[in-house]
């Protein structure tokens, strides 16, 4: 799990031979070697799918080394990680799976030249490429910090949650991970609220928040499993990232980090390499279309340095060697309330409407150095589009696919229902006795007590049970309950002497045989006991037979 | 695409037909406000959905196994999300509570639903379920997703199936030829006392209601006000009940409850109102509800507290139950909300006065004694204030990391003990168990191990002979109205004691400690060889052999020689 690399369990990959054939027919002039991929074992495969399949069958970890047949290019073993050809790899893979349907407008020739130009030069992105191709939006928002003094990290993640929810991503497509409870924390003087500002303008927690992973569930393992989709079979739908090849994902991480790692819950950490591998696995499993990765932590830019998968735009609140600073302190709660980068990001996002044309380019400039006190780092080389032309709502908003149909469907067609008209035998139901009948147990109690007592003698540290015989009880003097505070810190010692509220006789609330006489209000009452077998009757103010008194 | 559309449309079609035809389910919303003698106010919301399924429970379940969701997808008022989970995992009865705070039985009486701190879940699976543990795991995970709670931490290591404490509250099949199905092997109970309860749990809870939180009493459930209380508990209670008096047919009943304790002691004025407690007045009843009522218990009025209700109630009911007389003011929301938002105020004529407190006849508390981090003792004290003996069942459940010589297994199942006790009249019974604090494996410690480990409450079940301070609904009742004048032979209570925080021996995970350990190890490793080299000298020593070894070496030499010769 640590490496985040794929370890297949069942090899049920079906590689798209048929589609490939169809595509080859439509693009006859295409060089078939452009779809070839070279894997890390120096074997040329027809597509990435075949690599995954082979990796699964052989049990080795296989990754794509580069596009095209092996030995055609450089044979350096660290080709992908070192070189910047991942965009080439990305274009090619994109063509292999998702681009195909949308890319009918351009032919294979331009595509191949693009692939080649990307391999060696900075990509020149054609305009039709900058069009969005995603069909749904998801958000993974993670706060990795536990403890009250990390209030600001929860405020950070809830700020982004509020924005994406306001801009239209439904709760079912937001995975919110919060490592600790700040809203209902006993230290929070304003329960069920988390504010982003000392003036309490915005309650980022809101009134209908849904937290999917919380508390101890926020672990590195769960996070990587969530991203890669390798969850236990019983995991509920709300805890799954059910993305596909048309999903734009916003990943937002906040917490305490250092150079190359991000701490989870102060006890474990995810390294940038593990995160990069997890994203690569997502790409290979066609779990995303594009990712906007935002990280707000110290030395944040180190987290995206090891990424090598395509279509990722990464933003970090600070560069390596810099700290991400908090915005301001709220004396009412005694801790810093939000971090600078997210504060200004929320400030920007609050002005965005679902229909607005604000671009990611503007979003990348939200926190200049004199506001943030740290340099916001951006990594654009994996991202195929120009951020200045991408609307912010491509990641922060949600696109709902609407499919119009012109065919007429007969609604009134007969509906087959699974009605089983079996004749049921007459049944009789009844409620169960809620308390066992005690008489059969009285012998059992005695036996049990004897056993326990014998055990107690055998083993001095065994359970001690004190059984008081009924016969003995009658001889004993009845006393009000002992003050539990004598032996322990009881939560609620019963009042031994009631206070007089008015003149007269009152029955003791614990002991029906006992009653008090009050001379006047607020006096100390005089206690009396009724004679044996009598209890005090508060209606007649006298000692009475027990059968006439509700006690 | 068409393949997807046809079932969808047919579903819409079915619901359309269902909406036209009269429904066999109904929904009630009720709120009980009860001023307590300790100057707290107990607010209890109950949303009841009763669904008269034409099929009895067993066929319903069988049918569900055969065609998954076949029945539940036609639900009308019953929440479908929960219905699917219930039918999928073949659940007969489900009780789930999410609670923050401790209920003071002595001061506040007995609540409508007892609930221990944190999350608590009790489930009866259907008797046909083969692998109960698997269904239990699936159910808790599904509910974790539905209620945004960490119920997925429920596992066999913290679940028990006690024999006597829990009985099915729903009906069971008693017809001829049916084996008695009450078997605790199909029961699972688990408590997660650590669980926090906040808005994210209330949001999905409200979404299960037919009117969501848009209309009716649910509009009063504003999280900022609800979580600002001394005690709050939300609960889901599903069971199968009789749908006719002779009980040959069954219905499904879902009770969604919210219990809140508001404090009026700290306020300047003792007056309270709906708006003060919930932030807003009542806009109107849920249109889907058949019963939409607010009750205020005014028994304490005119004793030593005098208050008046504004506006005056629609009706007043006198309820005599088990020796306890209660006067209840009833507000029908429909008739009051015709003029818009309305608010109920309780105005006191006097300044702060405490009510007369008749303490509950049975209550308990639990604590840990001992010192050090090796062993301790768990003490449960049970108070019987009644003038006669009381029979109780005490369920002590102890996590596996506090080993005790009871049935249970480390890391596999918790230790639990069920005792049936007869408490003498006017007595305090003290029950103590000694336990060891075990040292866990380092990966088993949570990130904040020094905070301590929570231990769930003990449960005390008793059938009280009188109904003093007793509020729960009778077994055959579904709504709050059914608890008025409901005298029975006994009144069942299930008290929960405090959950406890235990500090287990915890290694120091902090950096300085680890640095010291590492440095010391390095020094020790370096010092040993250096010391050996500088103080010892290596000398060759002749090997002394006795006659057996000599013989052996002689034979070995022979063999080796003969082999060499062959080569």
Image (cartoon, coloured by chain):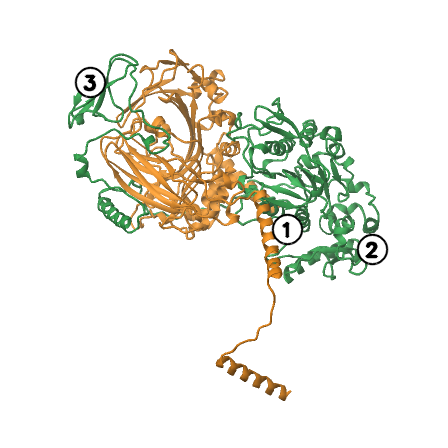
Q: Are marks 2 and 3 in contact (CB under 8 Å)?
A: no
Q: Which lettered chain is shown in orange?
A: B
Q: Nearer the viewer, mark 2 or mark 1?
A: 1
Q: Earlier in the sequence, mark 2 or mark 3?
A: 2
Q: To which chain does the residue with label 3 belong?
A: A
Does the CB distance between marks 3 and 1 fall below 8 Å? no
A278 with respect to A82 (left or right): left
Whole-angstrom CA distance, mark 2 to mark 1, is 39 Å
**Residue A399 locus on image (x, y percent):** 67, 37
Q: In the rendered image, which residue does mark 3 sit on?
A: A541
The total number of labels drawn is: 3
- The label shown at residue A4 is 1
The answer to whether marks 2 and 1 sit on the same chain is yes
Quadrant where the C terminus of chain B sits is: bottom right
Left or right of B98? Residue A508 is left
Left or right of B552: which side holds A88?
right
Task: Report the residue marked by disc 2.
Answer: A29
Q: Secondary structure at mark 3?
A: loop
- Of the pair A332 and A295, the residue shown nearer to us: A332
Secondary structure of the residue carrying numbered label 2: loop
| Chain of the residue on which disc 1 is drawn | A
Residue A533 in picture, x, y percent from top left: 15, 28
């Amino acid at each position: 799990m640590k490496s985040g690399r794929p370890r297949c369990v069942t090899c049920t990959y079906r590689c798209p031979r048929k589609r490939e054939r169809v595509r080859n027919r439509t693009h006859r002039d295409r060089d078939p070697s452009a779809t070839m991929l070279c894997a890390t074992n120096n074997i040329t495969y027809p597509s990435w799918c075949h690599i995954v399949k082979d990796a699964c069958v052989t049990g080795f970890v296989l990754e794509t080394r580069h596009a095209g047949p092996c030995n055609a290019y450089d044979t350096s073993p660290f080709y992908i990680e070192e070189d910047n050809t991942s965009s080439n790899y990305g274009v090619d893979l994109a063509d292999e799976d998702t681009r195909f349907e949308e890319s009918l407008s351009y032919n294979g020739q331009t595509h191949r030249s693009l692939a080649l130009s990307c391999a060696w030069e900075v990509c020149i992105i054609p305009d039709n490429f900058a069009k969005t191709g995603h069909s749904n939006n998801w958000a993974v928002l993670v706060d990795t910090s536990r403890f009250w003094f990390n209030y600001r990290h929860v405020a950070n993640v809830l700020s982004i949650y509020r924005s994406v929810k306001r801009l239209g991503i439904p709760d079912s497509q937001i995975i919110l991970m919060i490592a600790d409870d700040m809203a209902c924390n006993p230290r929070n003087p304003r329960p069920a609220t988390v504010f982003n500002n000392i003036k309490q303008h915005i309650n980022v927690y809101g009134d209908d928040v849904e937290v999917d992973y919380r508390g101890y569930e926020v672990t590195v393992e769960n996070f990587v499993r969530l991203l890669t989709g390798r969850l236990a079979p019983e995991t509920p739908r709300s805890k799954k990232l059910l993305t596909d090849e048309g999903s734009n994902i916003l990943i937002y991480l906040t917490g305490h980090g250092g150079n190359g790692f991000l701490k989870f819950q102060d006890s474990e950490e995810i390294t940038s390499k593990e995160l990069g591998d997890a994203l690569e696995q997502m790409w290979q499993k066609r779990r995303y279309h594009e990712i906007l990765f935002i990280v707000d932590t110290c030395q944040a830019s180190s987290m995206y340095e090891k990424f090598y998968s395509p279509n990722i735009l990464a933003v970090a609140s600070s560069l390596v060697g810099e700290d991400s600073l908090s915005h301001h302190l709220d004396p009412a709660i005694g801790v810093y309330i939000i971090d600078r980068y997210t504060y200004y990001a929320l400030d920007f996002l609050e002005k965005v409407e679902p229909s607005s044309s604000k671009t990611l380019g503007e979003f990348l400039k939200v926190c200049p150095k004199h506001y943030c006190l740290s340099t916001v780092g951006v990594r654009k080389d994996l991202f195929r589009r120009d951020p200045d032309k991408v609307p912010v709502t491509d990641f922060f908003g949600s696109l709902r696919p609407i499919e119009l149909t012109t065919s007429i469907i007969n609604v009134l067609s007969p509906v087959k229902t699974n009605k089983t008209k079996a004749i049921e035998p007459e049944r009789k139901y009844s409620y169960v006795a809620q308390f066992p009948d005690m008489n059969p147990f009285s012998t059992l109690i005695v036996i049990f007590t004897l056993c326990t007592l014998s055990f107690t003698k055998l083993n001095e540290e065994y359970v001690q049970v004190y059984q008081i015989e009924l016969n003995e009880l009658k001889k004993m003097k009845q006393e009000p309950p002992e003050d539990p505070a004598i032996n322990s810190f009881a939560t609620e010692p019963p009042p031994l002497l009631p206070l007089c509220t008015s003149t007269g006789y009152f029955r003791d609330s614990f002991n029906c045989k006992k009653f008090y006489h009050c001379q006047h209000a607020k006096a100390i009452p005089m206690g009396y006991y009724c004679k044996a077998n009598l209890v005090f009757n508060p209606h007649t103010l006298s000692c009475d037979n027990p059968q006439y008194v509700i006690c | 695409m068409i393949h997807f559309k046809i079932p969808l449309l047919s579903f819409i079609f079915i619901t359309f037909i269902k909406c036209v035809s009269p429904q066999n389910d109904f929904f009630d919303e009720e709120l009980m406000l009860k001023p307590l003698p300790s100057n707290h106010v107990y607010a209890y919301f109950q949303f009841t959905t009763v669904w008269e399924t034409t099929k009895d429970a067993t066929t319903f379940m069988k049918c569900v196994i055969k065609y998954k969701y076949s029945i539940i997808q036609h639900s009308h008022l019953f929440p479908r999300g929960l219905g699917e989970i219930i039918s999928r995992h073949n659940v007969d009865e489900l009780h789930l509570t999410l609670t923050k705070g401790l209920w003071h039985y002595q001061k506040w009486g007995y609540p409508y639903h007892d609930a221990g701190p944190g999350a608590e879940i009790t489930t009866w699976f259907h008797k046909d379920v083969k692998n109960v543990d698997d269904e239990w795991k699936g159910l808790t995970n599904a509910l974790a997703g539905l209620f945004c709670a960490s119920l997925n931490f429920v596992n066999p290591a913290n679940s028990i199936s006690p024999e006597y404490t829990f009985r099915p509250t729903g009906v069971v099949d008693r017809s001829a030829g049916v084996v008695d199905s009450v078997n605790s092997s199909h029961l699972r109970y688990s408590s997660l006392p650590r669980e926090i309860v906040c808005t994210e749990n209330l949001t999905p809870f409200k979404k299960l209601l037919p009117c969501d939180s848009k209309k009716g009493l649910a509009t009063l459930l504003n999280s900022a006000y609800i979580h600002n209380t001394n005690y709050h508990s939300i609960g889901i209670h599903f069971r199968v009940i009789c749908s006719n008096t002779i009980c040959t047919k069954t219905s499904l009943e879902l009770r969604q409850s919210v219990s809140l304790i508001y404090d009026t002691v700290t306020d300047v004025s003792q007056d309270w109102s709906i708006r003060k407690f919930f932030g807003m007045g009542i806009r109107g009843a849920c249109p889907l509800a058949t019963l939409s009522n607010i009750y205020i218990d005014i028994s304490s009025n005119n004793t030593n507290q005098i208050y008046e209700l504004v506006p005056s109630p629609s009706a007043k009911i006198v309820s005599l139950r088990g020796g306890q007389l209660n006067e209840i003011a009833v507000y029908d929301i429909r008739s009051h909300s015709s003029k818009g938002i309305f608010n109920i105020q309780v105005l006191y004529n006097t300044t702060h006065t405490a009510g007369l407190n008749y303490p509950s006849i049975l209550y308990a508390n639990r604590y840990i004694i001992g010192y050090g981090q090796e062993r301790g003792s768990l003490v449960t004290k049970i108070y019987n204030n009644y003038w006669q003996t009381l029979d109780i069942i005490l369920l002590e459940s102890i996590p596996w990391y506090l080993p005790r010589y009871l049935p249970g297994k480390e890391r596999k199942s918790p230790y639990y003990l069920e005792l049936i006790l007869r408490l003498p009249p006017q007595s305090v019974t003290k029950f103590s168990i000694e336990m060891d604090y075990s040292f866990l494996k380092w990966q088993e410690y949570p990130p904040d191990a020094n905070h301590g480990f929570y231990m769930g409450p003990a449960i005390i079940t008793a059938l009280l002979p009188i109904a003093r301070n007793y509020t729960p609904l009778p077994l055959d009742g579904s709504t709050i109205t059914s608890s008025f004048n409901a005298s029975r032979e006994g009144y069942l209570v299930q008290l929960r004691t405090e959950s406890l925080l235990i500090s287990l021996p915890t290694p120091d995970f902090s950096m300085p400690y680890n640095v010291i350990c590492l440095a010391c190890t390095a020094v020790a490793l370096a010092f040993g060889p250096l010391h050996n080299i500088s103080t010892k000298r290596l000398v060759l020593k002749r090997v002394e052999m006795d006659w057996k070894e000599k013989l052996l070496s002689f034979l070995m030499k022979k063999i080796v020689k003969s082999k060499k010769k062959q080569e």
